[in-house]
Amino acid sequence: MSRPSLRRLAAATAAATLVATGVTVGLGASVAQAAPACALNQSVTDSWAGSLWTPYTVSKEVVGDGTVAPGHTVTYLTKVSGSGALVNQIRDFHPAGFQLVKARLNVKWLVGDQQWEDVTGTAVVGNNAVIAKGGGWTTAGGGVIALETTYKVPDNATVGSKLDSGAGTNIVLAAGDWNINPMGVCVTVRPPNPVEAGSGSLEDLGFGSVNTGSGQVFGSITDPQG
């Protein structure tokens, strides 16, 4: 049995908390609600019988300003945290047509500290999803499992469109399989700037980009709500 999706179940009062910069929603057991409005980040917390009513959180954010030009890259950060159980999958659901460029995993191992691992070649890719799998990563002691995914946006993406995405996980508990798709974490397609339209991206010129991973990503994974 899988966890209920945000589209199907949520607390009625959560609708008032949906704001442009993000949202934290506790999943309830009875009240239907439409998917949230687009934001740069969303966070969903749930507890259920299989978790002994202790909470777990899935969150996702767009790294940078939430805009991208056709043919260029955008990065998302998906995180899972909770009350001590193991997590053996973390999933990113991306808009149709996006092509994976890079995937990195950052977990709190049973022994050791947080560290990034390139999982581009080992992640399961298909059906508009990127899934990192493992033997089990702990959420005990404030452990956070984070998946950073960078995609190339289609060259023919429509300027002005807002493209939604989602996230998911498998927590090693009864009914711990949980997908939230769509989640209301959106990227807006904008016209290319002069650099992108001319000689290439800011990355190509060595200046970095607001749409790729950075030090701010590492800082945010220590806060499951951030």
Image: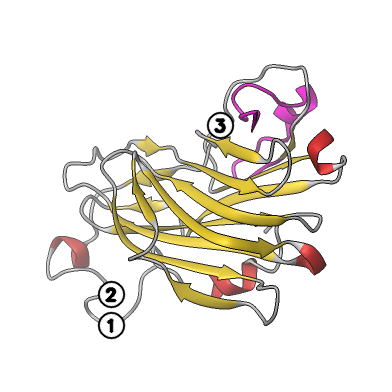
Q: Which residue appears farthest toward the front when viewing the image?
A: 135
Q: Report the residue at 65% width, 73% height from top.
A: 109
Say the numbered circle drawn on residue 203: 2
Which amino acid type is shown beneath numbered disc 3? Ala
Which amino acid type is shown beneath numbered disc 1? Gly
Q: Report the residue at 63% width, 73% height from top.
A: 219
Q: Report the residue at 67% width, 42% height from top.
A: 23
Circles 1 and 3, Cβ within 8 Å, touching? The answer is: no
Q: CA distance from mark 1 to mark 3?
A: 35 Å
Q: Position of residue 91 (x, y in %)?
A: 50, 49
Say the numbered circle drawn on residue 37: 3
Disc nearer the start of the sequence (1/3): 3
Mark 1, other Cα within 10 Å: few <14 / some 14–19 / many ≥20: few
Along the line of sight, the residue nearer the viewer: 186 or 100? 100
Q: CA distance from mark 3 to mark 2?
A: 31 Å
Tell me, yes or no, if residue 199 can be seen here: yes
The answer to whether 99 appears left or right of 108 in the picture is left
Q: Quadrant of residue 6?
A: top right
In the rendered view, would you say 99 is above or below 20? Answer: below
* Residue 21 is covered by the magenta coloring: yes
Which amino acid type is shown beneath numbered disc 2? Glu
Tell me, yes or no, if residue 21 can be seen here: no
Q: Position of residue 90 (x, y in %)?
A: 54, 53
Q: Which residues are magenta?
A: 1-24
* Residue 11 is covered by the magenta coloring: yes
Q: CA distance from mark 2 to mark 1?
A: 5 Å
Say the numbered circle drawn on residue 206: 1
Disc nearer the start of the sequence (3/2): 3
